[in-house]
Amino acid sequence: MQETKTIRTTRDILKDVRDQGRIIGFVPTMGALHEGHLELIRTADKECDFVVASIFVNPIQFNNREDLEKYPRTLEEDLRVLEKNHCHLVFIPEVEEMYPGEVSEDYDFGKLEKVMEGKHRPGHFNGVAIVVKKLFDIVEPDKAYFGQKDYQQLLIIQKLVEKENLDVEIIPGSTVREKDGLAMSSRNKRLTQEERQIAPLLYQTLLKAADMVPEKKPGEIIEWARQQISAQPEFSLEYFEIADAGDLLPVKNFINNGNYVICLAAHLGNVRLIDNVIINS
């Protein structure tokens, strides 16, 4: 496995790969890798000839300085598991390499960036779009892999590809979970032992809420779920929403053959957790 830190070296290596007619698969990450990331790497390995990963904690997508500073960094272990799972090249730039000057790009994703994560984390998705566009320009992948745990981010990236007319296929990967249902996340490393024991309540609530579709109205389900989570004083619920799976606009009534996603975000101690379930009625 090759490791690069500069854009020039990365491009030079990948130009040779591309000239050989090999299909490039790309998995961008912020490190602190878990099975969710590795499943994307393994899928890319099956579908592509050459697998690239990036490890870069992107400062401009954090609107909470403390969250940025506390984001787990486990580079040595990350490199070990990437090599074990047949990653061919990992790009590990410093902030100065990615942002040598002032960052001025401003993307408009309309209503898609105004709800849920976008509403509670202003500027977050613009930071995501900027770094993903930069990484796509550097790697020029044929396929790029993103997990559905960050469902809204996945839709934003699909919209970015459409708006910028980028020649890359976005491949979604199913959410990978612990045995007790907790969605795997790099932030899980920050949970205390006691918090980790109660964290699966979020997924359990999502599943029970999904079972109520379409017998109960969306508003009734949301109110029930909020009460369930609020009954646990350790949780501070940020949002619980039932939305159209295509545009994430809130759903007022269920219709036949509708596709929905139930999304939530909650703070458990000092850790912010997100999760979702997708419903194809």
Image (spheres, helix red, strand yellow):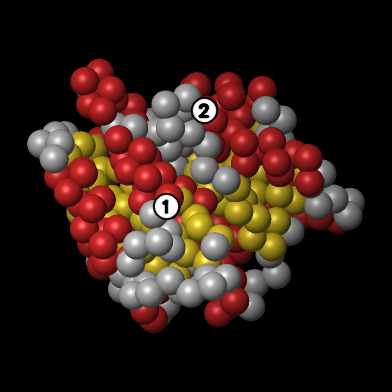
Mark 2 or 1: the one toward you: 1
**Res 103 seen here:** no
User: For numbered disc 1, what is the local secondary structure?
Assistant: helix
x and y, in percent, of residue 138 in the image: 61, 58
Q: Residue furthest left?
A: 233
Q: Residue furthest right?
A: 20
The residue at the point 32 percent across, 43 percent down is 205
Residue assigned mark 1: 210
**Res 254 seen here:** yes
x and y, in percent, of residue 168 in the image: 68, 64
Q: Residue furthest top?
A: 193
x and y, in percent, of residue 100 in the image: 41, 59
Classify 10 Å Cα crowding around label 1: few (below 14), some (14-19), many (20 and above). Answer: some
N-terminal of the pair, mark 2 or mark 1, is: 2
x and y, in percent, of residue 181 in the image: 43, 32
Classify 10 Å Cα crowding around label 2: few (below 14), some (14-19), many (20 and above). Answer: some
For the C terminus, the image quarter is bottom right
The amino acid pointed to by label 1 is Ala
Residue assigned mark 2: 78
Q: CA distance from mark 2 to mark 1?
A: 35 Å
The residue at the point 51 percent across, 51 percent down is 148
Mark number, residue 160 = none
Instruction: Indicate whether 29 appears above or below 168.
Output: above
The amino acid pointed to by label 2 is Asp
